[in-house]
Image (tube, helix red, strand yellow):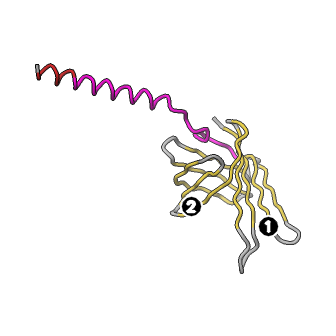
Amino acid sequence: MSKYLKILLFSLMAFMGCEDDKASESDPVNPFVGTWSLSSVAATIYTTPAQTVTFIADGETTYETLIFTESGTFSYQGAIDGDMVSGSGTWSSTDDILTYVENGQTTLWTYEMPNNDEWSCYVETPENDTSYGTRTEYSWVRAD
């Protein structure tokens, strides 16, 4: 009898393990996951009056590809006004905050995602003794 109980218990545990896998397979994928192409970058310096410089992605001097994975990592590469940029790190998101951790530095971006194929985000830095306050805004479209 004990032998049959062990077999039944083992079978039940294996079955329950399979059910857990099926449940996790149906969990929704975060809408950020995928490959994104830069649409534009706008940098505002809070001088008096404020000054904004906008770079439109043209595929030559301004372009960037950003990849978010399901496992919470990201990587990017491209150029902003001809200056090469690249990097990687980890990411997470809540209702309206996208958190990047790159080279040990955490940056919180406020984002808006009107649909699953485009989003924008911005970060503001306050004025201090050596620099004006700024706002940097990126706009993205899905590449895949």
The crowding category of the residue bearing disc 2, from other C-alpha atoms within 10 Å (few below 14, some 14 to 19, many at least 20), is few
Considering only vertical position in the picture, is 26 above or below 42?
A: above
The type of residue carrying mark 1 is Ile
Total marks placed: 2
The type of residue carrying mark 2 is Thr
Give the x, y percent position of residue 102: 54, 59
Q: Is residue 111 left or right of residue 76?
A: right
From the image, tell me which residue sits under label 1: 45
Mark 1 element type: strand
Residue beneath the point at 72% across and 80% down: 129
The crowding category of the residue bearing disc 1, from other C-alpha atoms within 10 Å (few below 14, some 14 to 19, many at least 20), is some
Considering only vertical position in the picture, is 72 above or below 11?
A: below
Q: Quadrant of residue 106?
A: bottom right
Give the x, y percent position of residue 103: 52, 62
Residue 95 on the magenta span: no
The image's mark for residue 22 is none
From the image, tell me which residue sits under label 2: 106
Closest to the observer: 38 or 10? 10
Magenta residues span 9-38
Closest to the observer: 101 or 96? 96
User: Which badge, 1 or 2, comes first in the chain's sequence?
Assistant: 1
Real-space CA distance between mark 1 and mark 2, rounded to the nearest whole angstrom = 22 Å
Residue beneath the point at 63% across and 35% down: 144
